Amino acid sequence: MSGGPAIGVRAPEAMQTLSGSARERPPGRRSHWLFLIWILFGALFFLIPLLSTILFSVKPKPWYLAYVNTFTDPKFFSSLLYSFGIGLATIVGVLLLLVPTAYWVHLRMPRWRPIVEFITLLPFVIPAVVLVFGLIRVYGSRQLPLLSAPFGGDVLLVAAYIVLALPYMYRSIDVGLRSIDVRSLTEAAQSLGAGWPRILFTIILPNLRVALLSGAFLTLAIVMGEFTIAVFLARPAFGPYLSLIGQNKAFEPASASIISFGITWLAMGLIAYIGRGQRGQTRTVGAR
Amino acid sequence: MASATPAAEGQGVRFVRPVRRRSFTWLGLVPFFLFAALFIFLPAAFLVVGSFQGPDDQFTLQNYADLTSTEFIVGAFRNSLEISAVTAIFGASFGFVLAYALISSGTPGWIRTPFLTFAGVASNFAGVPLALAFVFTFGNLGLVTVALRELGIDIYSSGFTLYSKLGLEMTYMYFQLPLMILIIAPAIEGMKKEWREASENLGASSFHYWRYVAFPILLPSLLGTMILLFGNAFGAHATAFQLTGGTINIVTIVIGSQIRGDVLHNPGLGYAMAMGMVIIMAGSITAYSLLQRRSERWLR
């Protein structure tokens, strides 16, 4: 909510020259270098593991061998494609579920806001491993054998990922709706004769574009790398694939990891690009 | 609860509006609640009920009693709590200093902006690839391990191994630190320059300023974020699984083995374990939101 790094800039320079800038300096000067050294250590901690992975991926004799092996492994593409498809299904599902809900809560049922909000925060309380535990016991049981039905596992996987996406997706949509005047827009549209689908798709949705797109890319980044739920539901997703080659092969895991970083970074880069000029928002989900 | 408004409204305008209108409003929330019921509450209820059931489906509290008397499970909870606490405390303190250093006016923008952007990416970078990256770095043949060995320091002969609690803690720091930076940065930015100026005008030293002004204001945010980091590490599964091959005794790994095949030889005990986890997570999230509310008093 505080407008990013701009806050420090806002203090007029005149103030500095007026109120003893000489007194402001001394604590700054010395700690200045300490700060930079500290930042350097932080940067090293973050960069060395990435560097190691890159170096490992180019270690075999022709340096590109691990990449060739990765790209020629049919399982690599099939798992990547599978995860991508699941990711898209999750995005569509979570949008269809949450946009009308959040809109309706804003417009007609504000009293229900705390309850809806509470439910969307539940994934923070229920870790992924516990969620999948419950899902398997309910839907994998003999009474409800959804897991053995064709596509049953996929449906369950998408549903679980929608649950994981609820907290930040809802927040994102909620913030978006707060920043526009939903009531006036809706009333104006209604008085011009628009029906509900038209209001939702041509008026509300375009106004939420940034919120929805960044949420969608974050969902994609998370689904592409998710391991726990996919592995227990025995789905051929990218996370379990990476885990498996990580246990069996030497250099291919490094090249596959680099590719997986690339996907995450691309998604996050797109979020930053879409949200440029927007107020800074923390976007994170629970640990994996 | 929701019917309160339409009902009150209905009294005045009963003759104008048909009663039918009421029912349409709440219908809008049905898909959401249906989804939540099917994929959150039903699985959760299954675990709750199961945790109170004995081998013959009768009601029992034995599972919760076993939770505290089975040494293996107590060990798993102890390890999980320890790892979460250690990474939360270190992540929060290092992360705070790092965030403060990044935001301080002496740090050039070309360092600050990429670093903060990177923190946003790194906090989402967890699980299998993270574990692999740390194996490539601090594993037996990792870059840092080998480099140190060439310098004559063999960290593995001095008892260190990445596939241990310490190794796991180091790995978790990779997502704990950036998360701390992301969450605490707005709080640090919210500190007003006037507070320092006012305290200096009153003759306070830098120590006094931190001790009596800045620290008390930041304390709720600091503690709150620390708790969030705690929960973050407590629920992590994939990173630990990949790093240790599922051999480390922490709660998420044990629950994972319990899903695969009843390793505890008692389904109810597994459900009770899952419930124990949910209770700890719920406690930490509640504490977090209470502290967050308190910190908003000064830092809007």
Image (cartoon, coloured by chain):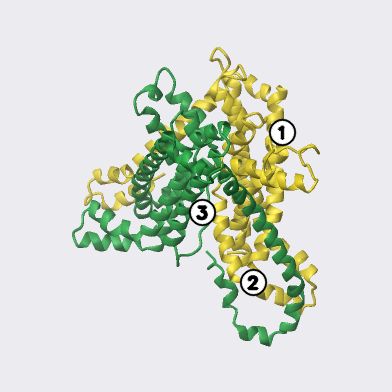
> Looking at the picture, which amino acid does disc 3 mark?
Arg
Determine the residue positioned at 76% across, 38% down.
B156
Q: Position of residue B65 (x, y in %)?
A: 68, 22
Marks 2 & 3, CB-CB < 8 Å contact: no
Determine the residue positioned at 23% across, 50% down.
B17
Residue at image mark 3: A283
Question: How many numbered discs?
Answer: 3
Task: Please indicate, yes or no, whether residue A225 appears anywhere in the rendered image.
Answer: yes
Q: Which mark is residue B78?
A: 1
Crowding around mark 1 (Cα neighbors within 10 Å: few <14, some 14 to 19, many 20+) is some
Chain shaded green: A
Task: Please indicate, yes or no, whether residue B44 appears anywhere in the rendered image.
Answer: no
Determine the residue positioned at 30% across, 62% down.
A185
Residue that sits furthest to the top in the current view? B56
Chain shaded yellow: B
> Looking at the picture, which amino acid does disc 2 mark?
Lys
